[in-house]
Image: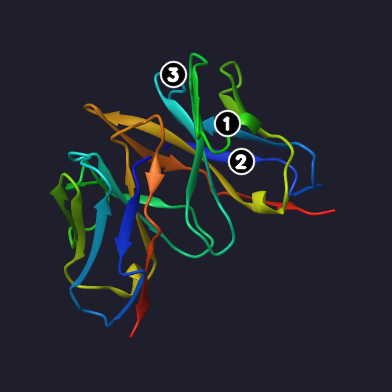
Amino acid sequence: QVQLQESGPGLVKPSETLSLTCTVSGGSFSSYYWNWIRQPPGKGLEWIGYIFYSGSTNYNPSLKSRVTISVDTSKNQFSLKLSSVTAADTAVYYCARMALAGTISLLDYWGQGSLITVSS
Amino acid sequence: DIQMTQSPSSLSASVGDRVTITCRASQSINSYLHWYQQKPGKAPKLLIYAASSLQSGVPSRFSGSGSGTDFTLTISSLQPEDYATYYCQQSYTTLLLTFGGGTKVEIK
């Protein structure tokens, strides 16, 4: 069974960089797109971006200037960095696997989520 | 950007009721539409992919339909464990994945 687990500090100060890591276990790391999605408290889901196992990336244009997603295939991990955070970046951050069903991409496995609070 | 609009934003229903949730895309997305269920404090769970395909392990009371711009998620007989928030999501363009605003299904 594929499992994803987010890890990182729960509290980040304004203007600093948020860093999260997702560790994947129980399945292949190759040939998938690995995603970050966030959800502000009481609100809906916002896709942040993804990285292919080979390292190619794609980001949400609304966050692109502040986001970096990287991968470490030796550890089956991928990471998120979001710079210059403000209170508006307070959210539960999820990592998720994107699989292909034919030509259709879908998010089939998700981590449990990590609440990140931006506050001084 | 492809905007996804869900309706209603919330509904109240009783156990055994038939429940229908609608999702509309701002442009045609063929069948690149998926439905997720999210319970409080939990991650979203994939229910339906490609508009009408049931994810493995999901009860058959859940079904999806539609193509182009208009899609529907139906729960044929609502069960206590189905009270949750439901989201649609398009992957027509994987350059920018977008979700609907969610539909909260509450106990009547």
The chain letter for the residue carrying disc 2 is A
State if disc 3 and disc 2 touch (CB < 8 Å): no
Residue closer to the observer: B37 or B60: B37
Chain bearing tag 3 is A
**Residue behind mark 2:** A6
Quadrant for the N terminus of chain B, please.
Answer: top left
Compared across the picture, whether A93 is left or right of B97 comes to right
Q: CA distance from mark 2 to mark 3?
A: 19 Å
Q: Which residue is mark 1?
A: A64
On screen, residue B27 versus residue A46, left or right, reads left
- Contact (Cβ within 8 Å) of mark 3 with mark 1: no
Q: Please identify the quadrant where the C terminus of chain B is shown.
A: bottom left
Q: Residues within 10 Å of mark 1 (few under 14, many from 20)?
A: few
Q: Earlier in the sequence, mark 2 or mark 1?
A: 2
Tag 3 residue: A30
Residue A80 can be seen, yes or no:
no
Please name the amino acid that badge 1 sits on.
Lys
Report x, y in % for residue B76: 16, 68
Does residue B30 appear in the picture of this structure?
Answer: yes
Q: Residue at x 19, y 40 (%)?
A: B31
Q: Are marks 2 and 1 on the same chain?
A: yes
Amino acid tagged 2: Glu
Image point (52%, 16%), residue name: A55
Rendered position, A65 above or below A10: above
Model colouring: rainbow
Q: Secondary structure at mark 2?
A: strand
Q: Residue A29 placed where, x, y %?
A: 47, 23
SS state under label 3 = loop
What residue appears at the point 26 percent right and 56 percent down from the top-left corner? B23
- Marks 2 and 3, the one that precedes in the sequence: 2
Dividing the picture into quarters, in which one does residue B95 lie?
Answer: top left
Task: Using a 10 Å C-alpha cutoff, classify the residue at mark 3 as few (fewer than 14 neighbours), some (14 to 19) or many (20 or more).
Answer: few
